[in-house]
Amino acid sequence: MLDIPLLVRVHVDALIAAQNDMGVCDAIEQNAPAGKLAIMSAPHVPKVAGIDPLVPPPAHTVAPHPSTPAPPAAAGAVLQDRLAGWVSDLTTLHELTERLVRTRSLGTALDELLRAGAALLGARRGLVVLEPAGGLGPATTVGLGLAHADLGHIETVPRGSTSYGRLLDGIPGSPRPSEIAHPDLLGEPELDPRHREVAARLGYAASYALPLAAEAAGRLGAAVWLYDEPAEPEERRRHVAGLYARYAAEHLARLLELEQARSQVATVAEELLPSRLPRVAGVRLAARHRTGPRGGGDWYDALPLPEGALGLAVGSVSGSGPTAVAAMGRLRASLRAYAVMEGEDPVAVLSDLELLLRLTEPARSATALFAYCEPARRKIVLAGAGHSPPLIVGERRTEYVETSLSAPLGMLSCWEAPSVELVPAPGETVLLYTDGLLQRTGDPMDRAFARLHAAAASVPRADRDDPEAITDHVLRTVLPDGADSADSSDDVVLLAARFD
């Protein structure tokens, strides 16, 4: 991993040593105020274009080298400018890496990488092609200033004629390049015709590409920045951008490993939940489950019982991660067994579950709600342990079911609470859910309950006969603007049962 402050110290020490070798330090010390080196008070050059919006972007192309060396009298000023430039560039690099390390998802990290690289290199557009080696993650392409259709046009160019293709695949018999610059794409006589056509259509005339590779994970992908006119970043910009790309690759590797771990936990959690919902006469079911980034212990269940009955359950185990997922699986399997044996008495089912939890996992608690349904009679008997009340949605009412207050399972030495009986009207839907649906809103619980009630009451009349449409509408309304994404910390479970 790169140590940005260490890089600053190394370059400062090297340039001061160069001044000492040239014999200019004495003159600098004589003119330095208050005993400080005048070089440390040299004018601070502006940061790289794009970091400070008040600073105009400098030219893209390399400045011509002077034909003769600088006169000895100007050597101190040259070194002062060089030192100030290095300090400015490395300070900017430090700020950019600080912004990058604050990203917590792969998508935001790729966006930050493209924006920072564009600022460092003076480009306006770019793309990242992510193709991690070793199955670390799926391949993806992200663009900056490029629409989805633009990326599609670029992907039609033969891979071997693109910068990212040569960086990722290399040329047989030759090492992979560390960078690829095309200062004038349209002026290259050997440019692939399709590449020329796409460049002309999208309006870019030059490109600069860097590989993305981590020390442990190996190849991750490549980043390409595009210029509207023929241009090439100067050597100083290339060096800073290369340092940033190395740091960004290590950060991307960590995020990819985290994404892979999250995906594996989510897969295990999904496998522990019902693979499909049962079909029982007189009732239609729908379920939605969202797993949090660390993997939680929320679950739901629907199992057919003797004499045409149906058992519905939702619950949540305390904690997160693989241990919570494993505990959820054990608790759900136990509840299924108790429901088959004595499902007509939900209080007995939860009492047995509480005793099992207290004896086998005394350090863990859980909330649960179990409902014994008789669809032919449209009768439901339910009991809850520290769980949120169900919500009935119908043509004439949208209201919470009044359930007795009870502590979660594992919190008391002996759990028992009275059951509640309700009779839904024909066409009404009963919604069971976990607290994650309320907590992901970010509102206090009273406001979250009000938001859920309003979402259920606003289900369009045409959708009230379809439990799938009802669950989708409630999720979209309660959790707008991507609040139900994988970046949220809580699991969400929503189970709907519509009675004919």
Image (cartoon, rainbow, N blue to C red):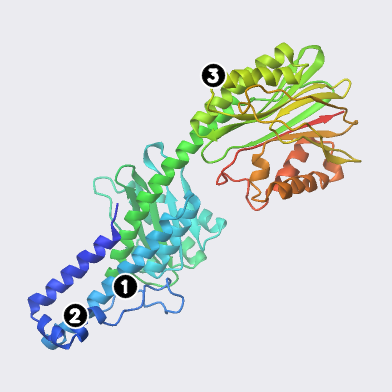
Residue 336 in the figure: left or right of residue 75: right
Q: Residue 398, can we see it?
A: yes
The kind of secondary structure element at disc 1 is helix
Work out whether 260 lies above or below 88: above
Percent across and percent down for residue 434 are 67, 36
**Foreground of the two, 325 or 235:** 325
- Percent x, y of residue 364: 55, 28
In the rendered image, which quarter is residue 493 located in? top right
Q: Which amino acid does label 1 sit on?
A: Ser
Q: Earlier in the sequence, mark 2 or mark 3?
A: 2
Q: In this view, does 318 lie to the left or right of 25?
A: right
- Location of residue 186 with respect to 476 vertically, above or below: below
> What's the CA distance linking mark 2 and mark 3?
70 Å
Q: Would you identify the image quadrant in which residue 257 lies?
A: top left
**Which residue is label 3 attached to?**
360
The amino acid type found where label 2 is placed reads Leu
467 left or right, relative to 49: right
* Tally of marks: 3
Q: Nearer the viewer, mark 2 or mark 3?
A: 3
Nearer to us of marks 1 and 2 is: 2
- The image's mark for residue 37 is 2
Q: Residue 88 carries which label?
A: 1
Residue 13 image offset from top left, x and y in percent: 17, 68
